[in-house]
Image: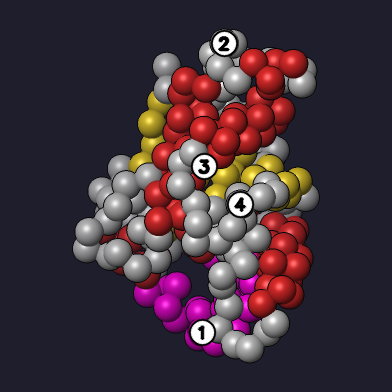
Amino acid sequence: MLAVFAHPDDAEFGAGGTLARWVADGLEVAYLIVTRGDAGGFDDTPRDQMPVLREAEQRAAAAELGIREVTFLDGYFDGRLTPTIELRRDITRAVRKFRPDRVLTNSPLRRWERIAGPSHPDHLAVGEATTCAVYPDARNSFAFPELAAEGYEPWVVREVWYQSGPSPDHVVDVTDTFADKLRALHRHTTQTSHMDMEPFLRDRMATVARDSGLPDGRLAEAFTIIRTE
Ligand SMILES: [Zn+2]
């Protein structure tokens, strides 16, 4: 499966427990991260260091979940993403290269009740561009002829999982992999060192579990899943 996200840390915040479960189940997981999070951070780290630090943090966080394949796109910047044809083409290239059955990505839909965080414009842009890459771009042999010229053949992704969107329709019980998620998030030092993360995450994930009818004490991550065929 291929996880496509706008920023380093998106995957772990929204789906770290689920990704750890998938790896444990033997799924092959690869990341495609569109920016290096150059507009992130909360201290006086020199701005030109931020993308370097965050790329390293993302690779370390992925490794905590057992994920080794991490690719960053070049030429896209934190806070400036829109679902351009170029971004669709670059995500399509990755889809045709990795040939995943499942894609996990940011939701392209805005949550009006919680605009900060999930509804960051970069998330909406990547969710939209990835959806367009899944259908129709990756499967249409006439889309982006330059990709065929590079040797990337059409590919059909069977399902898309969206994180942090409105009205999710699926939850994953990640109580057993919560520690992995926490460890991975601690690797995003520039983003998380100022937070007391464990109580914050436990509270939020317990609410997700409770709202979906899981027993008390369980922790969950929520998604919207679409089938593409
Ligand atoms: Zn983000």
Indicate the amino acid at tag 4: Tyr
The yes-or-no answer for disc 3 within 8 Å of ligand 1 is: no
Element on which disc 2 rests:
loop
Mark 3 and mark 1: span between their CA atoms?
A: 26 Å
- The residue labelled by disc 4 is 76
Q: What colour scheme was applied to this rendering of the protein? A: secondary structure
Q: Are marks 3 and 2 in contact (CB under 8 Å)?
A: no
Characterize the local packing of mark 1: few (<14), some (14-19) or many (20 or more) Cα atoms within 10 angstroms: few
Q: Earlier in the sequence, mark 3 or mark 2?
A: 3
Mark 4 and mark 3: span between their CA atoms?
A: 20 Å
Indicate the amino acid at tag 1: Met
Residue 163 seen from this side? no
47 in the magenta segment: no
- For image coordinates 30% across by 64% down, the residue present is 115
- For image coordinates 61% across by 52% down, the residue present is 76
Q: Which residues are magenta?
A: 176-203
